Image (spheres, helix red, strand yellow):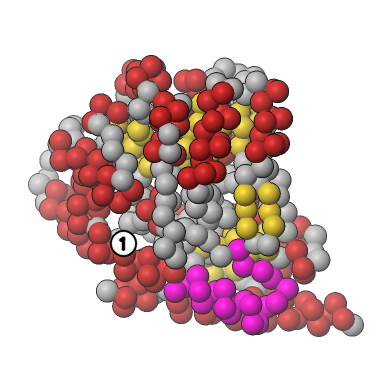
Amino acid sequence: MSSSFDKVIDRRGTGAIKTDLLKKRFGREDLIPLWVADMDFQTPDFIVKALKRRFSHEIYGYSVPPDSYWDAIINWELTLHGWKFTREELTFIPGIVRGIGFAIQCFTKPGDKVIIQPPVYMPFIHVPQDNGRELIYNPLKYSRENYEMDFDQLEECMAYRPKMLILSNPHNPAGKVWSKETLIKLSDICERHNVLVISDEIHADMALYDYKHIPFATVSDGAAQNSITFGAPTKTFNIAGLVSSFAVVPNKEIREKFFHYLTVNELNSPTFVSYIATEAAFTKGKKWREKMLEYVQENVDYVFDYISVNIQTITVVRPNASFLIWLNCKKLEMDHGQLIDLFVNQAHLALNDGEAFGPGGEGFMRMNVGTSRLVLEKALRQLTDAVNAYLSLKKE
């Protein structure tokens, strides 16, 4: 199976954002794409076979998901994370970013305040703002390549009477798996101030190094009753283009309001592609997931060890989860434009710019290591040459 992860697959010309938007996004196409958060691994054969089986029936009309689809989600979450919820608490949503937008529209009004914890996944910034809501920042505390929540500052945020907090769990881009104690503290503060927690748990199934993901809704009854959780198989099984996500809402009052919003706008009905892929992933994907995580963890270790030895002006924030690595480039002492030029025009690499993740992201870059080791080796050699050339020029 590892050979399938080693395989280098050319995605150009398939409509892949990662490759086909390089020119528009970075101004050139001769870049190794290590930015968009999907992996370059082949979609697992059990998902491909399930879809082919359905496509062989050549009528693609309106369809309804079978009970086995919902059971697959429920059983997966119970088995992997010890999270027990009922069918009535569960619904389909057409993507987690869209789900965040739906929740904002459903539970807040224009001008209402929404808390986020930067540096954080870019749509957490854009979706509330573009919907006319005001952002309140509760920046994470960064020390010794580790991130923690700042609860004293969060208490200060409550003076602005926010309506919602959007949680990245595990955290993107830092790859932080939040502890139960942290999530309990967060829940207690938000419950006390009547702030609804929206927990994005799309990377939940990708914990590394014996870390264990803890669903926010499991840490206390208060957390369960004051939250909406979003999940998906899409990151884990590399099927983001199929758009198959779900929401879990234990609180009856919140659930009825949110599910009504989804229902009247016909936003809760999956296509057969979505539910077939999800059911295949969650019923047949246990071993594939384990092998994939082994490969990703080895890639993380490789990048960490290589940069520690060869590019000591860059520090790797080793993730607890996912295939995304947060690179601290501040020792290079570059301004924003110089840093982008180094990666794009000198190293010929496409990474995500840390400033896009909000306050605290300055001087960082996000690298996607969900790719073949051969690709990573080439990328790191190019980065080494570019950094060495810059440092040599700086000494002159």
- Left or right of 306? Residue 19 is left
Q: Farthest left residue?
A: 57
User: Within the magenta stretch, is there residue 147?
Assistant: no
Residue 83, placed above or below residue 314: above
Q: Nearer the viewer, residue 226 or 39?
A: 226
Left or right: where does residue 35 sit relative to residue 251?
right
Provide residue 118's location: percent of width, then percent of height: 64, 44
The N terminus, quarter of image:
bottom left
Residue found 72% across the figure and 54% down from its top:
362
326 is higher (above) or lower (below) than 71:
below
**On the image, which quarter does residue 212 sit in?**
bottom left
Residue at the spot of label 1: 289
Residue 305 falls within the magenta-colored stretch = yes
* Residue occupying image coordinates x 36% and y 50%: 234
- How far across and down, in percent of the image, does residue 370 sit? 44, 65
Residue found at x 70% / y 23%: 159
Q: Amino acid at mark 1?
A: Arg
Please say whether residue 17 is visible from this viewpoint.
yes
Q: Position of residue 150 (x, y in %)?
A: 66, 42
Q: Quadrant of residue 42?
A: bottom left
Q: What secondary structure is marked by label 1?
A: helix
Q: Is residue 12 visible?
A: no
From the viewer's perspective, is 214 left or right of 121? left
Residue 106, placed above or below residue 30: above
Q: Residue furthest right?
A: 396
Q: Quadrant of residue 116?
A: top right
> Quarter holding the C terminus?
bottom right
Q: Please provide the residue range marked out in magenta.
A: 298-317
304 or 31, which lies in front? 304
